[in-house]
Amino acid sequence: MLSEQSAATVRATLPAVAGAIDEITERFYEGLFTAHPELLRDLFNRGNQAAGTQRRALAGSIAAFATYLVDRPDERPDAMLQRIAHKHASLGIAPEQYEVVHEHLFAAIAEILGDAVTPEVAAAWTEVYWLMANALIAIERRLYEGRGGGGWREWEVVERVEETADVATFWLRPADGTPVPDFRPGQYVSVQVELPDGARQIRQYSLSGAPGSSAHRISVKRVHGDAAPDGEVSNHLHARMEVGNRLRLSDPYGDLVLDADEAPLLLASAGIGVTPMIAMLEQLAVTGHRGPVTVVHADRSPAEHALRADHEAYAGKLPDAAVHFWYERPEPGHPADRTGLVDLSAMAITSGTRAYLCGPLPFMRAVRTQLIGKGVAAADIHYEVFGPDLWLAQD
Ligand SMILES: Cc1cc2nc3c(=O)[nH]c(=O)nc-3n(C[C@H](O)[C@H](O)[C@H](O)COP(=O)(O)OP(=O)(O)OC[C@H]3O[C@@H](n4cnc5c(N)ncnc54)[C@H](O)[C@@H]3O)c2cc1C
Ligand code: HEM
């Protein structure tokens, strides 16, 4: 909890900090990467940095945390902290790195806000930073302990399957023959690859098979840049990863996990957002789940619908499942009322439904709005964003 004195100072300066967040972010990363170029090369996503998009997540979440502390001093935004800590754990973030971020973040704040940063203001925001950092460090420590220490391991591609023109599935096994770590459906691994210029870039990929298999399965969509550069890691995986090749994987992490009891479930995905849903559906099928499950998926066309056969097969094994596939460009014979963008208005969705969403943000916003309109509780709508989570600040 924030001290009373700091709370007043933070409340008074929040508008100035929040208003300058983009400039602070820019200066922060400039300072951080000048002092530590290896962090840009081997830890942060340099595509996001180059594009200038989605960089606000880190500093923005501190401002969101501060708002939370002053508005609701007796609570802790656990959902936000968990989400960040899982991402950090998958990246192998260590406690001592928080000192480095602190140094460059506060240098940026002092430079951008100038004289407004009195010693009192600096002290209050330092308190906010370490409250958040220590909460994250504690959750990350528990996550690492739960994995027996964590860390990167070499994995080998044991099978590759072309799912669609742009999506390939890779089956992976630990190169040292150790067992495949357990995970919960919905979780992801970080994949680190060495690119031709020597940089070791990291991206996350959801596990697209159920736990208990002798190999991890990931399904990767190749990102076309169109006017911008092509996605680095996805294209590298497509171009270079054949059976016998190796890559480095983290243990599985992620806070979007299937919680299946008797509540009706809704699994809604769009595009490559299908991957965690397939893991969940397979798990439901394998465990003989009997409750009602509604499966919704949106894609441009049936040919672009990755893992469609699994989608249908696992749903087909459930005694009480309804499947609704929506295509912008459907095949002949596809129902006209499931053409175009997802529209849940004609679907029976009960208010006690627990929903899992994964896909582009506009898709998730639309589905979330429709679900809330049908009486589904906001707390029962869970989601995964395939990029830095800018929704965090709104939670
Ligand atoms: C939890 C989680 C789970 C995920 N699961 C999956 C999954 O199961 N399957 C899957 O396919 N993906 C998944 N993703 C997404 C994946 O992690 C990558 O983000 C994706 O593969 C793109 O990475 P990339 O290296 O190919 O693209 P990047 O190199 O990261 O590029 C990203 C974007 O930035 C643009 N860009 C790059 N450089 C510039 C520049 N200089 N100027 C302008 N724009 C630029 C690119 O054009 C591209 O659109 C997941 C992400 C998360 C966070
Ligand atoms: C209090 C301190 C910190 C906060 C509040 C914070 C916050 C965040 C947030 C909100 C995200 C996005 C989460 C998501 O995508 O769902 C993120 C991602 C990330 N964080 Fe942190 N973070 C902190 C410290 C650190 C430290 C110390 C490091 C290591 C130097 C670090 C490295 C990263 C990286 C590499 C990502 C992934 C984004 C990318 O690759 O561009 N963070 N962090």
Image: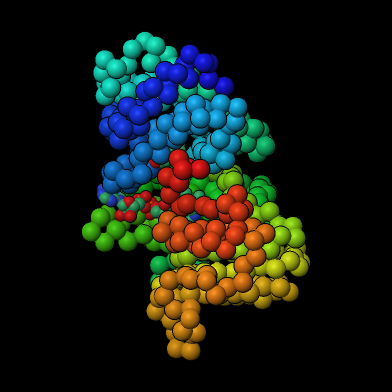
When asked about the image quadrant of residue 52, the answer is top left
Find ligand 2 in the image and state its quadrant.
top left
The residue depicted at 48 percent of the width and 20 percent of the height is: 7
Q: Is residue 263 in view? A: yes
- On the image, the x and y values in percent for residue 248 come to 50, 46
- Where, quadrant-wise, is the N terminus in this rendering? top right
When asked about the image quadrant of residue 45, the answer is top left
- On the image, the x and y values in percent for residue 363 come to 44, 61
Query: From this viewpoint, which residue is outermost toward the top?
Result: 119
- Is residue 271 rendered to the left or right of residue 141? left
- On the image, the x and y values in percent for residue 152 come to 54, 40
- Is residue 142 rendered to the left or right of residue 96? right
Colour scheme of the rendered structure: rainbow
The residue depicted at 65 percent of the width and 55 percent of the height is: 258
- On the image, the x and y values in percent for residue 97 come to 46, 26
Residue 297 lies, with reference to residue 331, above or below; the image says: above
Q: Is residue 273 in view? A: no
Residue 45 lies, with reference to residue 63, above or below; the image says: below
Residue 83 lies, with reference to residue 120, above or below; the image says: below
- Is residue 125 rendered to the left or right of residue 287? left
The residue depicted at 52 percent of the width and 70 percent of the height is: 344
Q: In the image shown, does 343 or 135 lie closer to the viewer?
A: 343
Q: In the image shown, does 24 or 20 lie closer to the viewer?
A: 20
